[in-house]
Amino acid sequence: MFNGLDFGAMFFNIRFVVLMATLSLSPALWALETDADESADVEFAIFSLNNDLPPLSKSKARMLYRGKSKKVGGSLKIVLVDLPETSMHREEFYSMLLGKSVSQMNGYWAGLAFSGKGSPPEELDSDDIKQILKWLNENPNGIAYAPVESVPDEVNILITVPQGE
Amino acid sequence: MLLNRQYSILLLSLGITANAEAGIELTDNILLSGFGSTSISKTDNKTPLFISREISDEICYDCDTLFGLQLDIDIFEGFNASAQVVKRTQDDWSDPELEWAYLGYEFADFEVRAGRLRLPLFLVSEFYYVGQAYTWARPPEEVYDAILGFTSYDGISLAWHYEISDEISLTISPYYGFERLNEVELGGTLLQFDTDYMTGVYIDLVGFNYRIHTGFMQTQYIQRPFPATDKLDVYTVGAEYSLDAWQWMAELEYDELQINWYASVGYALDDFTPYLVYAESHELRESKGVTLGLRYDATSTLSLNLEMQSIFSHEPGNRAQFVTSPLVYGEKDDVDLLSLTVNFVF
């Protein structure tokens, strides 16, 4: 199929280098596109009913929602809750906070669930704010997200996305 | 025997409740989850390709078939236990392997585990058998098969997790595995290693969209039937980085016998992710390979991979990624592989 091994390998090496170079140039363009998309979208609040939880930086929020951090304020262990997979808000939220699609996130959660390092967030049956508040009420160290306009005034808003920094 | 019974009980208990998203909650504190993969694969070479998979030029429906069950138990404050039983690609269904079984205890920034544990050498070591969790059909064999596919040790580990800042966290984890027998079949020969110990450490630097993993392992063993004691030092380094739809990964493995590496890039377009992998093996195995693949995420728990892989040997008669020298089969040194794989989790 391929005459001359070295030639074949060289061909692939060159093709690979060219492809990698092309690939590394494009993210900048891609980033511009997503930023433009984001500004038109809803704003989300990441919030809790627990007033002891400190405000989150955007980096911290991203670490939490990638399952790479489980604690806030140094020692307080928190729990996350997710909206159902059918929820539009879930898709928008992950795309805004992490730039990830639902299927990309599903891959990460599968890795996390089977790594012995933690588990994906519990999933609610509906994205109704009453359900979210009920879950937060049962989970004192729980953190949830929802569109900012649906969130009642008395909750502890830790950060808003995409605005917050 | 005991394992078989354990496995049957686990299989029977699958019927209890079904929640497709997050495994099956047997009680508030016990979670049962599972994963599996299978494929249709074929090469253009009679020599069996890849350790423990042995794909050749006849269409194979069970070369990549694996199925695993995992039980996670929250015992009480800080204590947890986990067990994973896997019918690996090389196992019969009636004889699966207890891949891990440990008791863990977390206190402050530390975690101690004791039992059978996963060797933390590579980026995807922890979910090596969970195809749903990585883009490829199989982790790149050049690197992941370097130590003959051994994945576990029996011993203890300590992990220290430290959050350097909101952006970066650090994990340092030394481990020690006690004496045991490691076995693997390679091209019809059963290799047996009486391992005195397997000890090492890994260091992870983690940000929200990247991870840098470095590992070191030293093992002392006697390969039967030879009387001599050997020692092997294995060094690994790997990094993954993702930006929006892009994902880059690269890993390198080095020991006294060999050096292997790969680089991989993927781009997620909604439910489709095309990806490209380039890999090289040197010294022990001599090959260069390229993989072009497409992953399709059909649902949140089911995915498909279509993959075309070409491996070029650069030393005539070298085993490369085969289980034995292609000379044994009177075959050419290069191989092309086509695979269609299904992965699922529950």
Image (tube, rainbow, N blue to C red):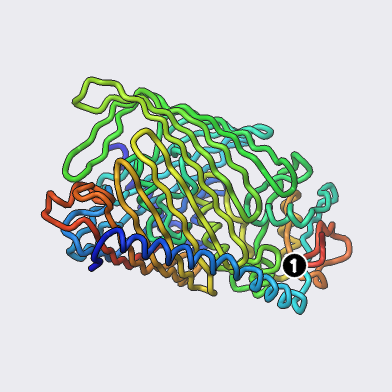
Residue B12 appears in the figure? no
Q: In which quarter of the image is the N terminus of chain B?
A: top left
- Chain of the residue on which disc 1 is drawn: A
Residue A18 position (above or below residue A62) = below
Q: Name the residue under label 1.
A: A146
- Whole-percent x, y for residue B128 in the image: 42, 49
Residue B29 position (above or below residue A161) = above
Q: Mark 1 is on which residue type?
A: Ala
Please indicate whether residue A59 sits to the left or right of residue B51 in the image: right
Residue A39 position (above or below residue A65) = below
Please indicate whether residue B186 sits to the left or right of residue A55 in the image: left
Q: Residues within 10 Å of mark 1 (few under 14, many from 20)?
A: many
- Which element is circle 1 on? strand
Residue at coordinates 45% horizontally, 71% vertically from top-left? B296
Disc tally is 1
Residue at coordinates 62% horizontally, 35% vertically from top-left? B78
User: A151 and B305: which one is in front?
Assistant: B305
- Whole-percent x, y for residue B332 in the image: 17, 58
Residue at coordinates 51% horizontally, 64% vertically from top-left? A20
